[in-house]
C-alpha cells in the first residue's frame, strides 16, 4: 500500500509551505528557492530521501531569507558560498553550534521562534528537529543505525536537508 507521503511531490510540499504566508522577503526567498529547485526535482516524491530534500528546500528558502534580509539584497543575489557558510563549521566545532547561530540570526530579524502566528518561526521549528536516533537505543540497534546512514535520517532537518541540496551531485545544476 502506498502512503500519501510516498506520492506527494517534493515541489508540491514546498509550494504548500510557501503558501503559509509570511513577510514579503520570506515569500521572495521561497520564490527563489522554488525557481532553483524546480528543474532538479520535477518528479521527486516524498519518499525517504524526498523528505530530506523537502527539508533542504525549506532550509534553502530560510537561508536565502536570512542572508537577503541581513545584507539588504534580493534572494536572487545570494550566492552558494554565502549559503554554504551558514552550515559550515569552524575547526574543532560540531554541528551543535550551528543551530544557535541560525536561531540568533532569526531573532535578530525580529522573529519570536515560539510564536505560532509567525510563519518563519513555524517553519523553523520543523526544520530544527533532530532526527538522530535516540541515545537509549539498544547497543546492537544503535550500531546498525550508525553503520547505515542511507536508511535513516540523521541530525537536524535543516542541516541534513541543506547539505543534501548543496551536495556535489547538484552543484552544476543548482545555479545559486
Image (cartoon, rainbow, N blue to C red):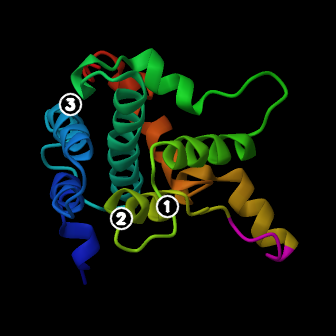
Residue 163: which disc? none
Point 85% across, 27% down: residue: 92
Asked if the stretch drawn in magenta spans residue 161, the answer is no
Neighbor class of circle 1 (other Cα within 10 Å; few <14, some 14-19, many 20+) is some
Instruction: Indicate the position of residue 80 as horizontal and vertical percent values.
Output: 39, 19
Q: Secondary structure at mark 3?
A: helix
Neighbor class of circle 2 (other Cα within 10 Å; few <14, some 14-19, many 20+) is some
Asked if residue 154 lies left or right of residue 19, the reply is right
- Where 90 sits versus 153, above or below? above
Where's the N terminus, which quadrant?
A: bottom left
Point 30% across, 15% down: residue: 172
Specify start and end residues of the magenta stretch as a single range.
133-138
Q: Quadrant of residue 139?
A: bottom right
Asked if the stretch drawn in magenta spans residue 135, the answer is yes
Asked if residue 56 lies left or right of residue 26, the reply is right
Of residues 41 and 75, the one drawn nearer to the viewer in this rendering: 75
Point 79% across, 61% down: residue: 143
Residue, disc 2: 118
Neighbor class of circle 3 (other Cα within 10 Å; few <14, some 14-19, many 20+) is some
Q: CA distance from mark 3 to mark 1?
A: 28 Å
- Where 114 sits versus 42, above or below? below
Residue, disc 3: 36
- Mark 2 or mark 1, which has the lower sequence index? 1
Q: Quadrant of residue 129?
A: bottom right
Asked whether residue 160 appears in the rendered view, the answer is: no
Circles 2 and 1, Cβ within 8 Å, touching? The answer is: yes
- Mark 3 or mark 2, which has the lower sequence index? 3
Asked whether residue 44 appears in the rendered view, the answer is: yes
Of residues 171 and 151, the one drawn nearer to the viewer in this rendering: 171
Instruction: Indicate the position of residue 49 as horizontal and vertical percent values.
Output: 39, 53
Residue 112: which disc? 1
Amino acid at each position: 500500500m502506498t502512503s500519501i507521503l510516498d506520492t506527494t511531490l517534493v515541489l508540491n510540499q514546498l509550494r504548500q509551505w510557501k503558501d503559509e504566508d509570511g513577510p514579503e522577503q520570506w515569500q521572495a526567498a521561497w520564490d527563489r528557492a522554488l525557481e532553483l529547485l524546480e528543474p532538479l526535482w520535477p518528479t521527486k516524491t516524498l519518499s525517504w530521501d524526498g523528505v530530506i530534500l523537502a527539508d533542504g528546500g525549506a532550509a534553502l528558502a530560510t537561508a536565502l531569507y536570512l542572508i537577503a534580509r541581513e545584507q539588504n539584497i534580493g534572494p536572487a543575489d545570494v550566492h552558494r558560498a554565502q549559503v554554504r557558510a551558514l552550515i559550515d563549521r569552524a575547526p574543532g566545532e560540531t554541528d551543535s553550534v550551528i543551530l544557535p547561530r541560525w536561531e540568533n540570526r532569526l531573532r535578530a530579524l525580529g522573529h519570536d521562534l515560539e510564536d505560532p502566528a509567525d510563519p518563519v518561526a513555524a517553519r523553523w521549528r520543523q526544520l530544527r528537529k533532530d532526527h538522530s536516533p535516540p541515545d537509549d537505543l539498544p547497543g546492537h540497534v544503535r550500531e546498525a543505525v550508525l553503520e547505515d546512514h542511507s536508511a535513516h535520517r540523521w541530525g537536524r532537518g535543516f542541516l541534513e536537508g541543506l547539505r543534501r541540496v548543496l551536495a556535489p551531485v547538484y552543484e552544476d545544476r543548482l545555479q545559486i
